[in-house]
Image: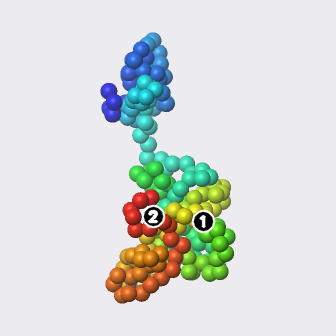
Amino acid sequence: MEGSFVLPGDEVGSAEEFVPGECTYARGGVIYASTAGHVRINSKVRSAYVEPKTNAPPRLCRGDIVVGEVIDLKDSLVVLSLAFKKGYEGRPLSDEEATIHISNVKNSYVKDLRHMFSLRDIVKAKIVDERQMRLSTSEEDLGVIKAYCNRCMASLQKRDGRLVCPSCGSSENRKLSSDYGTGVI
Ligand code: ZN
């Protein structure tokens, strides 16, 4: 039964065998799906639940980690076009914009944002205000996770805490995430 696709009202399992979990209900000893999705079993607590199948973008809340591309740089603000929320990579965010204020870039004072970010950088950040979509990159693992050379557009490589262009040799500064270049988000 696990993994099978169910519609609302389809049988998920036996209430004798499992506890009805999320997106299910029990009636007459049988657990039914209350939403369309895939049947999952949590063997630890012996519960059967349904993982909803939806293409709707996930809700964004304070504390969530998001990934986006730098689309504009102002004197005190970076503007990102958000791509996805961490853990929901398969459900892209559409037309969602967010900003990082210069005071939320690092724990220390930042004089010029242009030394921290550049257009087209891919940035991992944490939501600090979900109503105004303000983000922070002050933590160690937050910041730029992918960047391109401003001269020749090649992917920059991290060497000794700095970014170096393997193609033209140019070096650049960013507010780097400790995960830069690791493929980890
Ligand atoms: Zn280059």
Q: Residue at x 51, y 48 (%)?
A: 58
Tag count: 2
Whether residue 82 is visible, yes or no, is no
Nearest the camera: 8 or 83? 83
User: Which amino acid lies under the numbered mark 2 shown in the image of this protein?
Assistant: Asp
The image quadrant where one finds the N terminus is top left
Q: Ligand 1: does it lie within 8 Å of the C-beta at label 1?
A: no
Whether residue 164 is visible, yes or no, is yes
Nearest the camera: 7 or 147? 147
Q: Which residue is mark 1?
A: 138
Q: Which residue is mark 2?
A: 179
Tell me whether the residue at label 1 lies in contact with that at label 2, contact meaning CB atoms closer than 8 angstroms.
no
Measured as percent of width and height from the top left, residue 142 is found at 53, 63
Horizontal arrangement in the rendering, residue 75 relative to residue 161 (left or right): right
The image quadrant where one finds the C terminus is bottom left
Nearest the camera: 6 or 15? 15
Q: Quadrant of residue 36?
A: top left
Vertical comparison of 78 with 184: above or below: below
Measured as percent of width and height from the top left, residue 65 is found at 53, 56
User: Which amino acid lies under the numbered mark 1 shown in the image of this protein?
Assistant: Ser
Between the C-alphas of marks 1 and 2, the distance is 14 Å
Q: Residue at x 45, y 50 (%)?
A: 88
Q: Residue at x 47, y 75 (%)?
A: 161
Vertical comparison of 131 with 75: above or below: above
